[in-house]
Amino acid sequence: MERLYVKILSFLPEFSPDNEEDNYTNAVIGINKEFLNEFNSSSDEKTTTKTTTKTTMKQEKIIKIIAENPHISANEMAEKLNLTVDGVRYHLNKMRKAGLIRYEGSTKLGQWIIMKLNSK
């Protein structure tokens, strides 16, 4: 068993030390190392896979929408995808950085260009 040192902030006056600088109480808690390793690794892997899959699906939907109408705005995409405008812009920026899409032309008259299809 490995020891983990935790500083617990206390807001009750009876637990405060005598000076103003040390306003915490030390506690030593035993944690089973095997449990901690299993707990940390399993949740991270599941969350990463789930998030990556969702993002990929949204990106594929955005690419389909752009293919149908290259002049579409982020506001219109947000309505079609049932996302916020900021959510759509987040995915568009991520896709731009990955080299999947680019925007060519002026803000009002420009159009989206699909550079390459998303490969899983």
Image (cartoon, grey):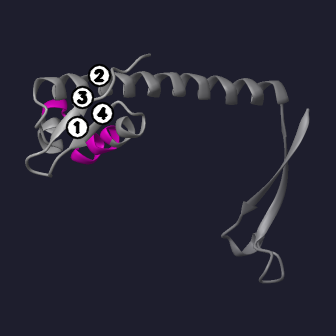
Q: Which residue is mark 2?
A: 60
Q: Which residue is mark 1?
A: 83
Seen from the viewer's position, the closer of residues 92 and 2 is: 92
Helix, strand or loop for disc 2: helix
Residue 38 occupies quadrant? top right
Q: Which residue is mark 3?
A: 62
Residue 84 within the magenta-colored segment of the rendering: yes
Q: Residue at x 66, y 70 (%)?
A: 11
Q: Percent x, y for residue 16?
A: 77, 74
Which of the two labelled residues, at mark 1 and mark 4, occupies the earlier sequence position? 1
Which of the two labelled residues, at mark 4 and mark 2, occupies the earlier sequence position? 2
Contact, CB < 8 Å: mark 3 with mark 2?
yes
Q: Which residues are magenta?
A: 80-92
Seen from the viewer's position, the closer of residues 104 and 118 is: 104
Quadrant including the C terminus: top left
Type of amino acid at the residue the image marks with label 1: Leu
Helix, strand or loop for disc 1: loop
Seen from the viewer's position, the closer of residues 33 and 81 is: 81
Q: Which mark is residue 101?
A: 4
